[in-house]
Amino acid sequence: MKKFLIFFMCISSVSFAQNIRPYWFIFEEGKKAFRDGDYGPALIAFEEARHERRIMYERMEQELINLLSTNEVRTFNDDLNRVEQYVAERYLVNAQAALDELYYRVPKESLNGSALQALAEIGHLKDYPEAEYWVGETYRVEGELTIALKQYEKAYQQRDLLENPGFAIEILYKMVDIHRIRQEYFAMERRALEILEQDTLWSRDTNAQTRTIMMRIIDNEGINRFLTIYRYNNPSVEQAHRLLGLYYYSSGRYNLAADHLMFSFLIQNSLLAREVSYGRFDFRFTTLEALLSEAQQKPGVNSYLETVEYYKTIYYCGAAWYASGRSGSQFWRFLTNQPQAGEWEVRARNQLRSPSIEGRQAQF
């Protein structure tokens, strides 16, 4: 009898136990393999993690279906509170585990006290956007861009399930980059504009009134006055503005190019000003030259300047200003005092001597 009880307890514990390697653990194993360059094992792990998560939530979904299908529970008229009480009173361990998992992922108050809505939400949790994204990443590094793009699109469609909602922008950037590589420029533009829906200063300025005022300040009072008045610390959208600015310049839409490049310029220098001001309560912006000189004393700043194509951005601000009927000289003049700008210093000097519109030379 004693042996039978031990056997029964073991069987029971197995039936209610989670997978020894839960989906999130398998997922982390995949990320480690990816970082190590083991792309085959990484892909297998990401696909297994996606599969295991689906199985887990399908079991929980079925548990709730079975519960809500019982005659007694059907008389509760979709009252989630009564269902919870029923589960607790009868020690329905699996059903309780399903509800606990649901409330961990979804705010209980959003269910409106509906058991059927709880069931729908637990079913919705089967998707795993992070795994879809990393499957896409694995195909991307292997050169399979078509498959990678489909995976990114799938992950983005499931973005409401992301552990970190802000990661949706990173997924969009991956799609933008693949469209750019494949020269699918309309699709690239569409996705980049989706990123800018997160830019409140841009998206709420529907009549471009703010942009017009900003440009007027640059034209009439100069870039130093502009950077004295405005700060915009929004690094997540800087790349989208820069890409669109260069794209619009190369395609002859110079006013749009000037708009976007101005925002990129503002964000880049706002972040430099923030970096310089750390630990310095007396910091005041004076000139762009002084800001850049001081910022370059900070570790990592030169790497940042290279990442955001700082000098190239300023050069094409001038180019877009000139092409849209304004004077781009103040942007170019700044570059001529920056020998570390290399190519962009040389090109700025040439533009100051003989300004011209460059056609399709802006690489984005």
Image (cartoon, rainbow, N blue to C red):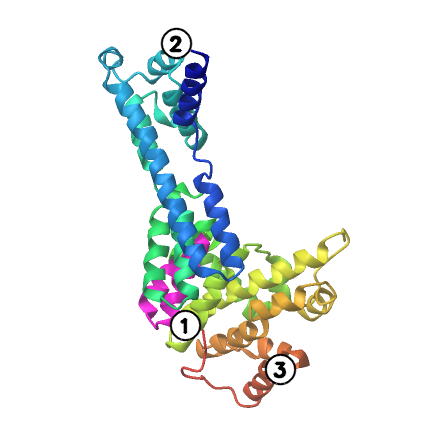
* Secondary structure state at the residue bearing disc 3: loop
State the image quarter where residue 235 is shown. bottom right
Q: Magenta span covers which residues?
A: 169-193
Sequence-wise first label, 3 or 2 = 2
Tell me if mark 3 has few (under 14), some (14-19) or many (20+) residues whose alpha carbon lies within 10 angstroms of its own. few
In this rendering, the answer to whether 240 lies above or below 5 is: below
The foreground one among 285 and 43 is: 43
Q: Quadrant of the N terminus?
A: top left
Q: Name the residue carrying label 1.
A: 247
| Mark 1, secondary structure of its residue | helix
Query: Between residues 233 and 149, which one lies in front from this camera angle?
Result: 149
Residue 342 screen position, x and y as percent: 62, 82
Q: Residue at x 37, y 35 (%)?
A: 56
Does dot 2 land on a helix, a strand or a loop? Answer: helix
Q: Please tell me whether mark 3 or mark 2 is closer to you in this view.
A: 2
Q: Residue 263 location in percent, x, y?
A: 51, 62
Please say whether residue 180 is one of the residues in the magenta stretch: yes
The residue type indicated by label 2 comes to: Glu
Residue 100, horizontal then vertical, whole percent: 43, 25
Confirm or deny contact between disc 3 and disc 2 (CB under 8 A).
no
**Mark toward the start of the polypeptide (1 vs 2):** 2
Q: Is residue 336 above or below residue 280?
A: below
Residue tagged 3: 342
Q: Is residue 119 left or right of residue 338?
A: left
Look at mark 2 in the image and give the residue it sits on.
89
Mark 3 is on which residue type?
Gly
In the rendered image, which quarter contains the C terminus? bottom left
Q: Residue at x 59, y 70 (%)?
A: 306
Give the main secondary structure of the magenta stretch.
helix
The answer to whether residue 322 of the structure is visible from this angle is yes
Question: How many neighbours does mark 2 have within 10 angstroms: few (below 14), some (14-19), or many (20 or more)?
Answer: few
Based on the displayed image, in which of its 4 quarters is residue 110 positioned? top left
